[in-house]
Image (cartoon, helix red, strand yellow):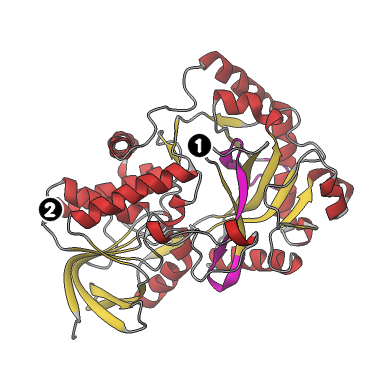
């Protein structure tokens, strides 16, 4: 096959896994020719027009979720410093290696300017009291040390990393979409891409690393089906973003910064957990391919609101013959978007208990003012499945026993909150798939969830590739 250009290693996606694969290669002294293919923009060109327009204008691709550092540049920028948090990578490589690598990756973030302060340490007695109340409510508390970059600081740090990669000879191809991998006799030989000018090229590579993040999970699943990359459906998380006044979460915010609570509420016993807590934060909207609008949350170092927001996610595990968990979650999101006329839906918890929708005039006179101003007041129970909604409501009532006021009538629920990492690529501890020369990393692989563990997976991949070159 004719190739337009060649490289030693092609990395598809400039999110944390892709970035740290390159950093692992460079810091191990590799002289390999590295090309990173990224659908979005360089970080210095990434900005969400909503800050000026006051509403989402549907950028394609979404500037919050695509571009250098992926969704990490616009997230709250929390680095979880415990291997208990961040997905199932420890099951693949071992907890000890995962924890040791977290510490090494953390040092890299510090070298590029991360805050030296660690949240969630230094108050053991207060943590014990929060855990005691959680246990009484039938919940598990996972207290994880957090290094909070902050949304604005995360962009600065990743900007410095981008400059470092470029100065070190890594070729960064922005506005370049990977269309497919090039296969020959069950061996990956390179990738086909669409360049910024609309032309298509093929890039030959000795190794191809796919690290496309949550946004690329659906694309990677199609790739697996087309090329026989062994994979299986994992759980899919469907839920809501909850927002309340800071006063309700004040103690937990001060002691832990982020409370990770896990429960298995009746009657279905699905796993339900809190995720991505943002003290003084802001609820945000992200757009995925096809215009699907999903909710997320941000937390800045300097800019603060009167509210705390966090996700409540209900995990769904499917059995044969069903094998399309991502499509399942997308359908739920599509229905929610329909009800909100393309916007995020918001509803008060008390209205859900009363069996009624929320009206805008009711939000206007509430103590809790939405930090997502263009969210549409409505009825999220018309979109989320009964099993999901029931599990979330019963979980919230349990959390209310541990954190009084959590399930107050004015607590806001935004929908849909969806996490697209359900496709689990089968691989060994060296990240080898059944396709020679092809490796799949990060959240799209189904093995990680979040900045730190995705970075860890990439860093280990880079070191391995450097040692083999």
Who is closer to the viewer here, 381 or 432?
A: 381
Where residue 125 is drawn, which disc sits there? none
Residue ID for mark 1: 301
Instruction: Indicate left or right for 162 with 224 as reference.
Output: left
Spatial distance from mark 1 to mark 2, Cα to Cα? Answer: 36 Å
**Where does the image place residue 258, in percent across and percent down from the top left?**
55, 33
Instruction: Indicate left or right for 282 with 6 as reference.
Output: right
Q: Measuring 71% from the left and 30% from the top, which residue is drawn there?
A: 248
Magenta-span inclusion, residue 124: no
Q: What stretch is highlighted in magenta?
A: 265-292
**Where does the image place residue 257, in percent across and percent down from the top left?**
55, 30
Instruction: Indicate left or right for 40 with 323 as reference.
Output: left
Who is closer to the viewer here, 224 or 182?
A: 182
Q: Disc 1 or 2, which lies upstream in sequence?
A: 2
Q: Measuring 65% from the left and 64% from the top, which residue is drawn there?
A: 333
Q: Is the residue marked by circle 1 packed among few (<14), some (14-19), or many (20+) residues within 10 Å?
A: some
404 is higher (above) or lower (below) than 67 = above
Residue ID for mark 2: 30
- The quadrant of the picture occupied by the N terminus is bottom left
């Amino acid at each position: 096959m004719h190739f337009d250009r060649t490289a030693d290693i092609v990395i598809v996606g400039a999110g944390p896994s892709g970035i740290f694969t390159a950093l692992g290669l460079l810091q191990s002294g590799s002289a390999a020719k590295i090309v990173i293919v990224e659908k979005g923009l360089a970080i210095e060109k990434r900005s969400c027009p909503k800050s000026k327009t006051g509403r989402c204008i549907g950028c394609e691709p979404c500037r919050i979720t695509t571009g250098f550092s992926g969704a990490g540049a616009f997230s709250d920028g929390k680095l979880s410093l415990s291997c208990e948090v961040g997905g199932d990578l420890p099951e693949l490589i071992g907890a000890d290696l995962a924890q040791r690598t977290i510490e090494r990756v953390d040092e890299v973030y510090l070298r590029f300017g991360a805050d030296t302060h660690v949240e969630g340490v230094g108050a053991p007695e207060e943590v014990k009291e929060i855990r005691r109340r959680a246990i009484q409510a039938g919940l598990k508390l996972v207290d994880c040390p957090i290094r909070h970059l902050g949304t604005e600081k995360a962009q600065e740090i990743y900007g410095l990393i981008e400059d470092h990669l470029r100065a070190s000879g890594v070729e960064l191809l922005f506005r370049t979409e990977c269309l497919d991998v090039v296969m020959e006799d069950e061996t990956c030989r390179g990738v086909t891409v669409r360049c910024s000018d609309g032309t298509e090229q093929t890039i030959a590579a000795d190794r191809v690393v796919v690290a496309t993040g949550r946004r690329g999970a659906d694309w990677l699943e199609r790739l697996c089906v087309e090329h026989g990359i062994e994979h299986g459906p994992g759980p899919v998380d469907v839920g809501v973003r909850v927002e309340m006044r800071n006063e309700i979460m004040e103690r937990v915010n001060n002691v832990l910064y982020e409370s990770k609570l896990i429960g298995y509420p009746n009657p279905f016993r699905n796993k339900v957990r809190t995720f991505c807590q943002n003290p003084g934060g802001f609820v945000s909207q992200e757009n995925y391919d096809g215009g699907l609008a999903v909710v997320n949350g941000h937390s800045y170092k300097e800019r603060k609101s009167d509210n705390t927001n966090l996700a409540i996610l209900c995990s769904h595990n499917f059995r044969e013959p069903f094998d399309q968990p991502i499509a399942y979650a997308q359908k739920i999101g599509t229905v929610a978007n329909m009800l909100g006329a393309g916007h995020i839906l918001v509803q008060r918890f008390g209205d859900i208990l009363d069996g009624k929708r929320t009206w805008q005039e009711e939000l206007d006179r509430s103590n809790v003012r939405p930090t997502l101003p263009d969210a549409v007041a409505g009825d999220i129970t018309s979109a989320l499945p009964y099993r999901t909604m029931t599990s979330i409501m019963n979980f919230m009532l349990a959390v209310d026993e541990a954190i009084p006021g959590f399930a107050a009538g004015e607590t806001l629920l935004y929908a849909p909150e969806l996490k697209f990492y359900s496709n689990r690529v089968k691989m060994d501890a060296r990240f080898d798939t059944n396709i020679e020369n092809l490796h799949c990393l990060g959240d799209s692989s189904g093995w990680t969830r979040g900045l730190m563990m995705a970075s860890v997976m990439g860093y280990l991949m880079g070191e391995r590739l450097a040692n083999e070159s």
